[in-house]
Image (tube, grey):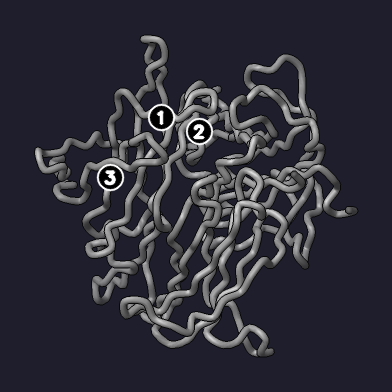
Amino acid sequence: MGLVSNRFTITAIHDGQTVNAIMRSNTTLAQRINKQSGECVPNWATTHPQVWVETDLGGKKRAAATYTWKYNGVALTFDSNGLCATDGYEGYFQKTTKTVGTVSFPAINIMKNIATISNTDNDIIEMTGSVELSGAQLPFSIALPVRVSELSASGYYGQLSGDVMVTSAQPTARVEGRLYVGTSQVNDQFWTKWYDEGTGQQIGSTIASETVSGERVARFSIADTAITDNIVLRCDFYTENPSSASAAVQASAFWEIDDETDEEKMYVNSVITDNTSSLNKGGIFLREGQSVTITGWMGKTTSTTTIDTRYTHFYCRLYDFENKVITSTGSPMAGQQPQQSGDYKGLWEVTKSVSVPGVDGSVTGGQIVVGYDYLTTTLGDDGSGVMLAATYDIFNP
């Protein structure tokens, strides 16, 4: 008990507030392309990332009874070998399953590079479906962005992969970091610093001084005792020892890990101005003229409406499309001044009385409102945020 963080992205809309759905991937869903050479980083034609959707009702995992995968809004079909047969996406995806505990969830493998010389904007992976409860079909829909962008010949890029949860059977999560320059992986020694992005505090550092199957890898491990519900990790990459005065961060990447053993759980609900509401852990897409109200509160793993009243302080930090922390005032800070430096750079308190779906009256939570204009001008069309809940005032512990 003490600190809990959860992340959201402002890119893709999703509906359905009865079924709790989470779209996961075993690596960062981001790819860059060198337009001169056509090479992609990383090369998904060989690494084949996997994306899957976990669904549950009342804290009990239940696989989807019906579901449809979509890419950029187009429903995908698959042949007898599980390969995508949809026009324009032939062979790009392979249908499979991902077993979590004893439940098999629908999954797809990405078999080809998404980035192309003509495609350097964000794409969307989506699933719509239903979970069966006592014969009734409860619908859900969830989406996540595939971040696609152009890469210069000399630009650095960090990539993370690893475990997305800790359980009683697997109490330690392991994450690996790889660094690229241009379209080539850095195989010289490099350094990493790891942070709890909710608090901004450094929790580890590693030196990528060894190679694994010919790849230079920075390894980091974190135990379940260091995680409450969910932790957002940030990895900063350096090409020289960070203790050197001339050392500079060359790239940063994020990774989330859920603690499936904790009874506490942070829920993040998003409501678009057209009253679309969602408890699912995916993204948010805003059209011109729209805004989204993002509300976080502490409940239990088995219940969104059993409020954990020990958490009395909520905070938020926003990032632009390059994962740089926003420190300016204005919407959605409403004139408040976020911290400008140190561990809590860009963090401001958003505690207030909020409405929670299924709960009468108000409860203590955190809330921000992000409008389309703020998204496009300040966050660069593609932003994200971290919501943090605490049992004490972290600015004055």
Residue lying at the far front of the rendered structure: 169
Tell which tag, 1 or 3, sits nearer the viewer: 3
- Indicate left or right for 292 with 80 as reference: right
Vertical side of 80 occupied by 375: above or below: below
The residue that mark 1 highlights is: 141
Q: Residue shown at 41%/15% (left/top)?
A: 133
Vertical side of 40 occupied by 244: above or below: below
The tag earlier along the polypeptide, 1 or 2, is: 1
Q: Residue shown at 21%/46% (left/top)?
A: 94
The reply to whether the C-beta atoms of the residues labelled 2 and 3 are less than 8 Å apart is no
Residue 100 position, x and y percent, is 40, 41
The reply to whether the C-beta atoms of the residues labelled 1 and 3 are less than 8 Å apart is no
Residue lying at the far right of the rendered structure: 396
Q: Residue shown at 32%/51% (left/top)?
A: 50
Vertical side of 250 occupied by 124: above or below: above
Disc 1 versus disc 3: distance between alpha carbons? Answer: 16 Å
Label 1 residue SS: strand
Label 3 residue SS: strand
The reply to whether the C-beta atoms of the residues labelled 1 and 2 are less than 8 Å apart is yes
Q: Amino acid at mark 3?
A: Ile
Judge the density around disc 2: few (<14), some (14-19), many (≥20) Cα neighbours within 10 Å: many
Is 319 in front, or is 226?
Answer: 226
The residue that mark 2 highlights is: 280
Disc 2 versus disc 3: distance between alpha carbons? Answer: 19 Å
Disc 1 versus disc 2: distance between alpha carbons? Answer: 8 Å
